[in-house]
Amino acid sequence: MTVEELSGLYYLRKLIEIEERCASDNRDDDEWRDQLLDRWKREERRLTEYIDSVPDVQVRLILLLRYVKLMSWDQVAANVGGGNTAHGVMTTALRYIKRSAERGK
């Protein structure tokens, strides 16, 4: 899985936020919003399944907080604790993603 694939929920969230700001009583808008929410659920399930397959507990937590909970790297570092920095947790995540992609996982 690539960083772009893992970032899918972030972009879906942005679309949903825009839709909610522009919401009207138009039925087509409701259908579109429902489609976005369905896509969000499928994407979240797909990412969660991938993250659940990560053998390292700390890497799994970092990926979950960043790509499912949509936290900033600073927030991820604070939640992971142990003196981790934003740069440190980002590096850990990106290394794992790169190695995983190279193995074809």
Image (spheres, rainbow, N blue to C red):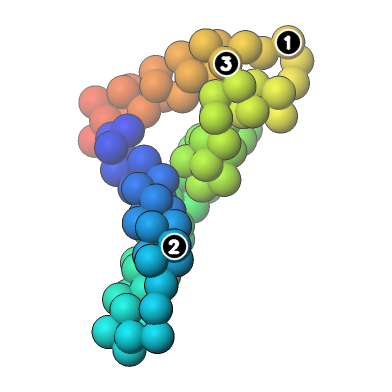
Q: Which mark is residue 83?
A: 1
> Around disc 1, counting alpha carbons within 10 Å, would you say few (fewer than 14), some (14 to 19), or many (20 or more)?
few
Between disc 1 and disc 3, the foreground one is: 3
Furthest toward the bottom, the residue is: 27
> x and y percent of residue 25 in the render?
40, 85
Q: Exactly how many numbered labels are in the figure?
A: 3
> x and y percent of residue 37 in the render?
41, 70
User: Is 101 left or right of 19, judged from the image as shown?
Assistant: left
Q: Quadrant of the C terminus?
A: top left
**Location of mark 3 (residue):** 86
Q: Earlier in the sequence, mark 2 or mark 3?
A: 2
User: Is 92 left or right of 11, judged from the image as shown?
Assistant: right
Q: Secondary structure at mark 1?
A: loop
Which residue sits at x=33%, y=89%?
Answer: 27
**Location of mark 2 (residue):** 21
The CA distance from mark 1 to mark 3 is 10 Å
Furthest toward the right, the residue is: 82
Which residue sits at x=28%, y=37%?
Answer: 4
Amino acid under label 3? Ala
Q: Which mark is residue 58?
A: none
The CA distance from mark 1 to mark 2 is 38 Å
Q: Secondary structure at mark 3?
A: helix
Q: Earlier in the sequence, mark 1 or mark 2?
A: 2
Amino acid under label 2? Arg
> Around disc 2, counting alpha carbons within 10 Å, would you say few (fewer than 14), some (14 to 19), or many (20 or more)?
few
